[in-house]
Image (tube, rainbow, N blue to C red):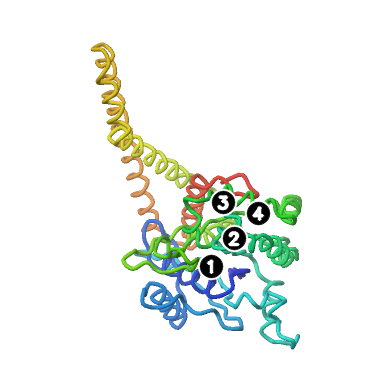
């Protein structure tokens, strides 16, 4: 199975930087990355060098992608004591965003590379639409220069998505880049509202609901996190001493695969999934909530309540002390119980990964892992589903 993924939008080096971040994120196997990516040595070296370039605070950001198209194929594999199990191949197509902008198309309409991009639009299995986070930030801040940007950009991009592929409408997800610039000042709900307010978006989504109804997502992504910041002059700059902290880099990749994996599994037999992955995501959410509750009791708010209650009568203070002790004990007991359940699930997950002996079992494990990641993502970003109702 070979999945052709076409990323639309992003002038400059946006697509190349995203690919470098994705490869860095998914090239090392661990409990979260059941599936890892492998590629040819020259591509791996190039992506690694791009990532090192990104990390080097003494250098500018990577230069813009040159005119032309280059396809980079990744083998998605699961590796354990029984060997490596190739699951599928994913091919990303890197090109300069100007090739889809009529203002930058050369006068020679027979340009070979331009024709190649058009063929990719016709044959791609999946579309990822990049929305520049810096431009979105300025738009939400009321920058008059950005007032028409989204209204011009979206119709231009969406017209490429109207053509059905051999299997009908192709999956499409919208990715907001440079999310670290928006996070804290604007929410994903506000970005979603701005998108849906554009003239062509409601009609596009309604057409998808009527003819396909597969999930369409709005995914906030940052390759760098706070390592890059917006300077007072409005330029993105690297921050010396700040480590890179990627956010959701793997989610656009993970989001497009469950349906593809199901199709591969259906070739052999009907699919019966374990829902331990969704349970694991819910337990992790509970653990986070309990930790926050404990921190609240032990932090400034809890100390303030203690001082206030300390000024009340003896009976009230005694009742409060008993209630607080009971609540602390309840939180601690529940934290330990959730921790034990999570530890059990992690051991079971690792056992499955070690014991996989067939490609079919590897596909099932990959599907469980991807759906667990999407479940936790949707829990954190409920506004991310433009179409769809969760897993």
Secondary structure at badge 1 equals strand
Q: In the picture shown, does residue 54 fall above or below 230?
A: below
Could you tell me if the residues under marks 3 and 4 are in contact, i.e. CB atoms within 8 Å? no
Of the numbered discs in the image, which one, if any, rests on residue 27?
A: none
Q: Which mark is residue 260?
A: 2
Q: Is residue 302 above or below residue 65?
A: above
Q: Is residue 45 visible?
A: yes
The reply to whether dot 2 and dot 3 touch (C-beta < 8 Å) is: no
* Cα distance in 3D space between marks 2 and 1: 9 Å
Q: Residues within 10 Å of mark 4 (few under 14, many from 20)?
A: some
Front tag of 1 and 3: 1
- Mark nearest the camera among 2 and 3 is 2
Mark positioned earlier in the residue sequence (1 or 3)? 1
The nearer-to-camera label among 3 and 4 is 4
Left or right, 197 with reference to 276: right
Q: CA distance from mark 2 to mark 3?
A: 13 Å
Q: Which residue is mark 4?
A: 195
- Relative placement, left or right, of 308 versus 32 is left
User: Residue 297: where, in percent of width, then height?
Assistant: 30, 32
Secondary structure category for the residue under label 3: loop
Q: Earlier in the sequence, mark 4 or mark 2?
A: 4
To which quarter of the image does residue 119 belong? Answer: bottom right
Q: Is residue 124 left or right of residue 182?
A: right
Q: Check disc 1 and report the residue beneath it.
A: 88
Q: Quadrant of the N terminus?
A: bottom right
Task: Give the residue number, with chain letter if any, for mark 3.
Answer: 271
**C-alpha separation, residue under disc 1 versus residue under disc 4:** 33 Å
* Foreground label between 1 and 4: 4
């Amino acid at each position: 199975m070979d999945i052709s993924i076409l990323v639309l939008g992003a002038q400059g080096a946006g697509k190349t930087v995203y690919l470098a971040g994705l490869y860095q994120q998914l090239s090392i196997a661990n409990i979260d990355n059941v599936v890892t990516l492998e590629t040819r040595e020259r591509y791996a070296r190039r992506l690694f060098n791009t990532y090192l370039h990104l990390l080097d605070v003494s250098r500018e950001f990577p230069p813009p992608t040159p005119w032309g198209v280059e396809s980079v194929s990744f083998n998605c594999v699961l590796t354990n004591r029984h060997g490596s199990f190739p699951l599928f191949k994913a091919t990303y197509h890197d090109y300069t965003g100007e090739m889809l902008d009529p203002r930058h198309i050369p006068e020679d309409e027979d340009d070979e590379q331009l024709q190649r991009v058009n063929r990719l639009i016709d044959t791609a299995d999946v579309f990822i639409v990049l929305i520049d986070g810096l431009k979105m930030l300025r738009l939400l801040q009321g920058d008059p220069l950005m007032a028409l940007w989204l209204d011009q950009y979206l119709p231009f991009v969406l017209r490429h998505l109207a053509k059905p592929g051999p299997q009908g409408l192709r999956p499409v997800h919208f990715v907001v880049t440079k999310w670290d610039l928006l996070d804290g000042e604007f929410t994903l709900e506000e970005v979603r509202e701005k998108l849906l307010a554009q003239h062509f978006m409601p009609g596009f989504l309604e057409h998808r609901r009527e003819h396909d109804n597969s999930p369409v997502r709005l995914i906030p992504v940052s390759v760098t996190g706070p390592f890059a910041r917006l300077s007072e002059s409005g330029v993105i700059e690297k921050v010396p001493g700040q480590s890179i902290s990627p956010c959701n880099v793997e989610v656009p990749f993970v989001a497009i695969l469950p349906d593809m994996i199901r199709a591969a599994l259906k070739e052999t037999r009907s699919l019966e999934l374990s829902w331990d992955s969704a349970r694991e995501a819910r337990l992790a959410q509970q653990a986070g909530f309990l930790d926050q509750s404990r921190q609240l009791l032990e932090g400034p708010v809890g100390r303030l309540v203690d001082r206030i209650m300390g000024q009340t009568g003896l009976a009230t203070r005694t009742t409060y002390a008993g209630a607080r002790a009971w609540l602390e004990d309840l939180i601690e007991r529940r934290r330990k119980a959730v921790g034990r359940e999570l530890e059990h699930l992690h051991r079971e997950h690792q056992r499955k990964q070690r014991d996989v002996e067939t490609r079919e079992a590897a596909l099932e494990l990959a599907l469980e892992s991807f759906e667990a990641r999407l479940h936790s993502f949707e829990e954190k970003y409920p506004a991310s589903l433009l179409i769809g109702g969760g897993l």
